[in-house]
Image: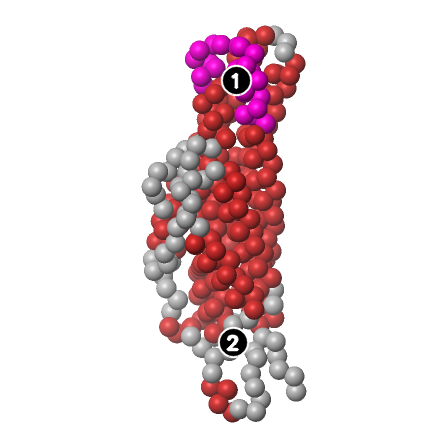
Amino acid sequence: MASSPLNSKSGSHGRSNSLPSRPHPLILKCNEHLESLRASKETSSSSTLLRHKVEGLQDLIECVEKLTQLPPYSRCPSPRVSRELGKRHGSLRLLDVCTAAKDALLRTKECTRELQSTIRRKRGGEVELTAEVKKFLTSRKVVKKAISKALANLNSTSKSSNISSNTNKDHRTVALISLLQDMEVATLSTFQTLLQFISGSTQSKSNSWLSISKLIQPKRVGCSLVADESEFAQVDAALQSFVFTKTCKFEDINNLQNQLEKMESCIKDFEEGLEFLFRCLIKIRVSLLDILNH
């Protein structure tokens, strides 16, 4: 009889029955993506580096989503392990922080387009432009306040305990729980860096992956990006300077347009990445709820 692709063992050796199952290829692939994210030690969160970080997270979450739909992992676990899984999967928390990032991008995009429209019309002169700039800065304050709240909620996350030794009989589910914990650390760390990037804040010489790891599982160690001045921060600074100096020179307006276009390009890229992540996280949550409800 052909060997199962999920449990490759040789039928000619009885001793193989006492050996643990070989990890499924998707488990190995997920671990590769995790190691790649942990190994990233960038000292700057430029938009290019952060895009790569988000792309790596997309690969990881897509891989986890496929794994949770496989019969060996989607099959109903024992009641004890089911309780462990219910305690540890943070899918709703991940969706919440993803939604916060999406909302911040959407609001910033809307006020950016309004400002660009005012600049292109060139009607009303400096008075109208100044009014629109102030409106943009006010909207950004709202965005930053929402981001600060999201980050505060993230930092107040309660610690999760280690997997109980009583669950060791269900190897596949224990492996899934461990993988979900690692995925949660990687996802929250990346979202934290992205939210800081959008708000234009800095986090010099800090380690967001490490801080999140301590919240989720104290023994896990990793690293993350350190925020640098982002396109969002550059636009904020340029507009604040415009309001204070009240200059409306052609070269200043031209530079402002260029900065707005760069920021809008960032917004588009991150919106697409977050939408993909959101859909995958929804599928993972549905799969986990199916496991818990059967």
Which segment is the magenta one? 240-261
Please rate how many residues cluster around mark 1, counting C-alpha atoms within 10 Å: few if below 14, some from 14 to 19, many from 20.
Answer: many
Q: Nearer the viewer, mark 1 or mark 2?
A: 2
- Residue 210, horizontal then vertical, whole percent: 36, 51
User: As displayed, is residue 278 above or below residue 135?
Assistant: below
For label 1, the SS is helix
The residue that label 2 is drawn on is 22
Q: Residue 139 location in percent, x, y?
A: 51, 25
Q: Quadrant of residue 99?
A: top right
Q: Are marks 1 and 2 in contact (CB under 8 Å)?
A: no
Question: Which quadrant of the rendered structure holds the N terminus?
Answer: bottom right
Hey, what amino acid is under mark 1? Val
Q: Residue at x 52, y 12 (%)?
A: 130
Q: Main secondary structure of the magenta part?
A: helix
Which residue is label 1 attached to?
133
Q: CA distance from mark 1 to mark 2?
A: 59 Å
Q: Is residue 245 visible?
A: yes
In the figure, 269 relative to 58: above or below?
A: above
Q: Nearer the viewer, residue 191 or 119?
A: 119
| Residue 108 within the segment the image draws in magenta | no
The residue at 49%/62% (across/down) is: 31
Q: Is residue 245 magenta?
A: yes
| Residue drawn at x 53%, y 51% as measured from the top left | 56
Q: Position of residue 269 (x, y in %)?
A: 59, 39
Q: Residue at x 37, y 72 (%)?
A: 165
Q: Is residue 287 above or below residue 78?
A: above
